[in-house]
Image (cartoon, rainbow, N blue to C red):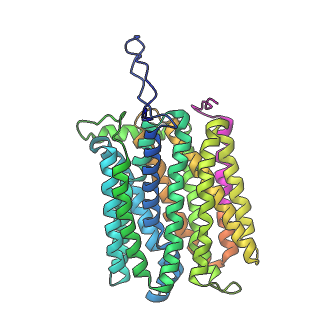
Amino acid sequence: MKSNLHTIPPIDPVALGMGEPTPAWTARGTVAYQRISIALFLAGFATFSLLYCVQPLLPAFSSEFGIGAAQSSLALSLSTGLLAFSILCAGALSERAGRRGLMFASMTLAAVFNLVAAAAPSWHAILLARALEGFSLGGVPAVAMAYLAEEIHPNGLGLSMGLYVGGTAFGGMAGRVGMSIIAEYFSWRVAMTMIGVIDIAAAIAFVLLLPQSKNFVRTATFNGRQHMRSWGRHLSHPRLPIVFAIGCLVMGIFVTIYNYASFRLIAPPFNLTTTETGLIFSAYVFGIVASSWAGALADRLGRGPVLAAGSIIITLGLVLTLSHSLIAVITGIVVMTIGFFTAHSVASGWVGRMAQGAKGHASSLYLLAYYLGSSILGSAGGWFWQKHGWTSVIEFTCVLVAMSLGLSLVLWRKPVHFQPAST
């Protein structure tokens, strides 16, 4: 039987006197494309299941350690904050150390720190372990996006990026729902231990599946000035900083809603149990579908209109959560989740298309903004919850989504480097 493992044959422009060789892209529909997609799905799963496994445990932390909602959110905010800055270091390091090995090491080390957090004897020890876990994870997100942008043919990049984001959605859902159920019937420490073990296994499967890079060019030495120039070039791009800002805003909205919805739903008039509240995080299933759908649709219609649509969908979801009907609140969370993953999938894919060289640096800047949105804006949402309640949280997030929509419309009117996929 003939193997289906192949890449699109490159035309060598050097032989024609036209410049640099065309990259040996991996084509959509090949075995190599499928292996890359599955491996990066696992990377997304591990990253988000480790990062957000504490989110449904925030009320439990508040009760056990005698702290408020905003303080308990530090178990997540410290991880995402340290992750944001480590992404810059990891993106630069991957230019010398390589993509595949760095992602594997980061996934494994982060899972080990999650096991340490599960056994930590005090609140401050948990925060330290979670901070180190977030810093360790920096080697996955930016490098994964850069790997896809370098290896996947542009006509299939939207779908592959959507599948990676779908993996983050599945990991986020599995972490949240699984932790809620296990914590109620056993303990939050048992739940965190199980997530750590599962993600060590995911890291092993990842490294066995992912092919070595074909288009990655390793730098011979670490050059700090060169990295600064690369970051500066992306920040001076006419459109990339707008995409970075959108990533920051939509992530801030998403984390704020998921952080404090649990506090609202376990209180009157809903009075849900931990397990019942955790099951609401199954809304991530819709995020998995939406991210893949949005990525493929953006390849055909253009990223601007799909990105703007994501912000509009988020707004509809936020408004629905104001209801005192449990069904309406759950529907609102589902709709908001669909809008978030639509926007994030398109924005992350657009970074790879816009960046001209040093794609790892561009990806790291996007994810720096993305996780700073999770850390800073997510913590700010806790202040609104403690001082003014759910209505104030929604007002805060509606301001953020209005800003995101405005920036999306700017990109829609003046798109950069978009070429529709062939049918």
- Is residue 250 among what the camera can see? yes
Position above or below: 255 against 217: below
Locate the N terminus by quadrant: top left
Q: Does the magenta stretch include residue 386?
A: no
In the drawing, does residue 417 fall left or right of residue 364?
right
In the drawing, does residue 238 fall left or right of residue 89?
right
Position above or below: 267 against 361: below
Q: Where is residue 246 in the image (x, y as percent from the top left)?
A: 58, 50
Q: Does the magenta stretch include residue 401?
A: yes
Position above or below: 269 against 251: below
Q: Where is residue 141 in the image (x, y as percent from the top left)?
A: 43, 52
In the image, what residue occupies the spot 65% across and 78% down? Answer: 388
- Residue range in magenta is 399-423
**Quarter of the figure with residue 12:** top left
Judged by its main secondary structure, the magenta piece is helix
In the image, what residue occupies the spot 67% across and 37% down? Answer: 301
Q: Position of residue 362 (x, y in %)?
A: 45, 42
> Which residue reaches farthest front?
1
